[in-house]
């Protein structure tokens, strides 16, 4: 049995195939990212015991960076304009959050009211704001 | 921007998913256009016009007339 060509498919079949392709691509991307994330501990250990030279660590980091950039470009090529807009909007909100959060925290720290700004906390909060904004858009809050 | 997408779709007895597949966009995009929450890009507006074989201005109305 042969698969239907794009022209032979109904709109609903085409949509299902398109959705399946995006879900598969995203799932594979996330799986690769997770494996890469878990491998950092192993790579770190290899570097610390002298098995892996510094250039090896830099090369692996560059490879991961190229993979990350490629994944994002490919993702934006596959999704439609509404999803691109939702992604861009969420990114903008996250950026504005960071642009306001860091100087605000710094100011309150300068006044002796709070502890020093914490980079990891700001990083996680920025990602959380971006993700929540994207999900809100996906739920139709436009 | 107002549009007649829902009416045109109903006239052909198409679901939102059917129209989305024909336009190569997500069902959410069709829904957002129909409910006026998203104005389509010019290339997508042209695809819609071509699909329904109508001029763009007969499908979309910016309320400026």
Image: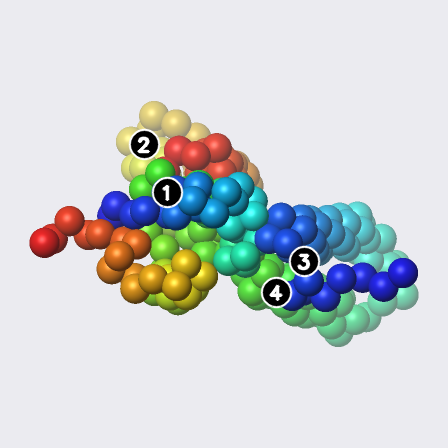
N-term mark: 4 or 3 = 3
Q: Is residue B36 left or right of residue A75?
A: left
Residues at badges 1 and 4 in contact (C-beta under 8 Å)?
no
Report in which chain the residue with disc 4 lies.
A
- Answer yes or no: is residue A37 visible: no
Q: Is residue A22 left or right of residue B3?
A: right
Q: Residue furthest top?
A: A113
N-term mark: 3 or 2 = 3
Name the element at disc 1: helix
Color style of the picture: rainbow
Determine if marks 3 and 1 fall on one subunit. Answer: no
Mark 4 and mark 2: Cα distance apart in space: 41 Å
Numbered badge on residue A108: 2
Mark 1 and mark 2: Cα distance apart in space: 56 Å
Is the C terminus of chain A in the top left, top right, bottom left or bottom right quadrant? top left
Mark 4 neighbour class, 10 Å CA radius: few under 14, some 14 to 19, many 20 or more: few
Mark 3 and mark 2: Cα distance apart in space: 60 Å
């Amino acid at each position: 049995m042969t698969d239907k060509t794009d022209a032979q498919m109904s709109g609903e079949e085409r949509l299902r195939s398109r959705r399946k392709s995006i879900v598969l691509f995203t799932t594979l991307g996330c799986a690769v990212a997770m494996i890469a994330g878990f491998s950092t501990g192993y790579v770190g250990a290899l570097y610390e015991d002298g098995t892996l030279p510094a250039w090896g660590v830099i090369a692996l980091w560059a490879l991961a960076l190229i993979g990350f950039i490629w994944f994002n470009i490919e993702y934006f090529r596959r999704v439609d304009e509404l999803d691109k807009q939702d992604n861009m909007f969420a990114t903008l909100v996250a950026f504005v959050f960071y642009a306001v959060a860091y100087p605000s925290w710094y100011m309150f720290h300068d006044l002796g009211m709070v502890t020093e700004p914490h980079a990891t906390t700001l990083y996680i909060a920025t990602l959380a704001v971006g993700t929540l904004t994207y999900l809100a858009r996906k739920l139709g809050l436009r | 921007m107002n549009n007649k997408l829902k009416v045109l779709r109903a006239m052909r007895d198409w679901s939102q998913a059917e129209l989305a597949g024909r336009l190569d966009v997500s069902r959410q995009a069709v829904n957002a256009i129909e409910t006026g929450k998203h104005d389509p890009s010019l290339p997508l507006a042209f695809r819609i016009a071509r699909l329904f074989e109508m001029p763009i201005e007969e499908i979309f109305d910016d309320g400026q007339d």
